[in-house]
Amino acid sequence: MKNKSSSLSPPANQRTSAPSPPANQRTSEPVINFSHVVKNFSRNNQKTFKEFLPALLMGEKTKVGFTALDDISFEIKRGETVGIIGPNGSGKSTILKLVAGVMSPTSGKVFTQGKISPLIELGAGMHPELTGRENIYLNGAILGLKKTQIKQYLQEIIDFSEIEEFIDQPIKHYSSGMYMRLAFSIAIHVNPEILLVDEILAVGDTDFQAKCFKRMEEFKAAENITTIFVSHSLSQVESFCTRVIYLNHHQIQYDGNPTEAIQKYFSETNK
């Protein structure tokens, strides 16, 4: 989501976004571009989106404690399905948060083009006191849909999530698997142009995971939705992604063929 409020927008020289061109003018142009991006955090910096947002609204600043990303540059074209792999702490989730616009780079530039649907943290964007149905409307509004548009997709979202029996209960009573079902169903029904998926599919039963991957395969086949997929399941990354970025030591170590990326990851991390 791109919030137009000046209080939430990163500095203009660090982050830019653009609307999508008309469908008949779309080619394989880049929809995501990182140019020499550095991201620093303080040791006590908020680690999650839900913790980060209040500090962002208050304009709080903290001293640098460590570097999450160090001079990262890459571009992703429309319709690509890109996996990001690497050890814990290598910067995978930070890249997704920069793409989603929930944080800005310390230096360098991030450019995105198109409607972004982020699944980067379980429960982010959800209000625990609201029902599942109410959270569908809330998330739809956050992602830029009008109420009439949300109503149009409402039943499809409920049906895909397979939690209709609980849809009018407050989501604070939901299991993590039910959270994931609802969040994923919302994300794929809001006509995303860029889909960000960060480990969320590790939650829930295998049948629903298979259902989610089937839908994402449909997105990949359509070649008009860009997906960035972060997972510790290297077999899922290799089978689903057409390109993989391998991060280590906060830098890109390899960007290209999924099998070669995974082999390099194993060879370097098993030393």
Image (cartoon, rainbow, N blue to C red):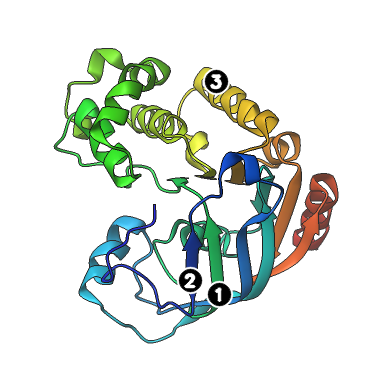
Labels 2, 3: front one = 2
What is the CA distance from the residue labelled 1 to the residue labelled 3? 36 Å
Residue 177 in sight from this viewpoint: yes
Quadrant where the C terminus is found in the figure: bottom right
Q: Residue at x 43, y 77 (%)?
A: 12
Please state which amino acid type lies under the numbered disc 1: Lys
Q: Is residue 72 left or right of residue 3?
A: right
Labels 1, 3: front one = 1
In this rendered view, identify the residue nearer to me: 33 or 212: 33
Return the x and y of residue 132 as percentages of the image width and height: 24, 28
Q: Is residue 123 left or right of residue 227?
A: left
Residue 15: give its label: 2
Question: Would you call the spot at circle 2 few (<14 residues within 10 Å), some (14-19), or many (20 or more)?
Answer: many
Looking at the image, residue 63 lies above or below residue 165: below
Question: Would you call the spot at circle 3 few (<14 residues within 10 Å), some (14-19), or many (20 or more)?
Answer: few
Looking at the image, residue 141 lies above or below residue 91: above
Of labels 1 and 3, earlier in sequence is 1
Q: Residue at x 28, y 63 (%)?
A: 53
Indicate the quadrant where residue 245 lies: bottom right
Of labels 1 and 2, earlier in sequence is 2
Question: Which SS class for mark 1?
Answer: strand
Q: Residue at x 43, y 29 (%)?
A: 189
Dots 1, 2 in contact, CB < 8 A: yes
What is the CA distance from the residue labelled 2 to the residue labelled 3? 35 Å
Q: Residue at x 68, y 47 (%)?
A: 82
Report which residue position mark 3 lands on: 211
Looking at the image, residue 249 lies above or below residue 262: below
What is the CA distance from the residue labelled 1 to the residue labelled 2? 5 Å
Report which residue position mark 1 lands on: 109
Of labels 2 and 3, earlier in sequence is 2
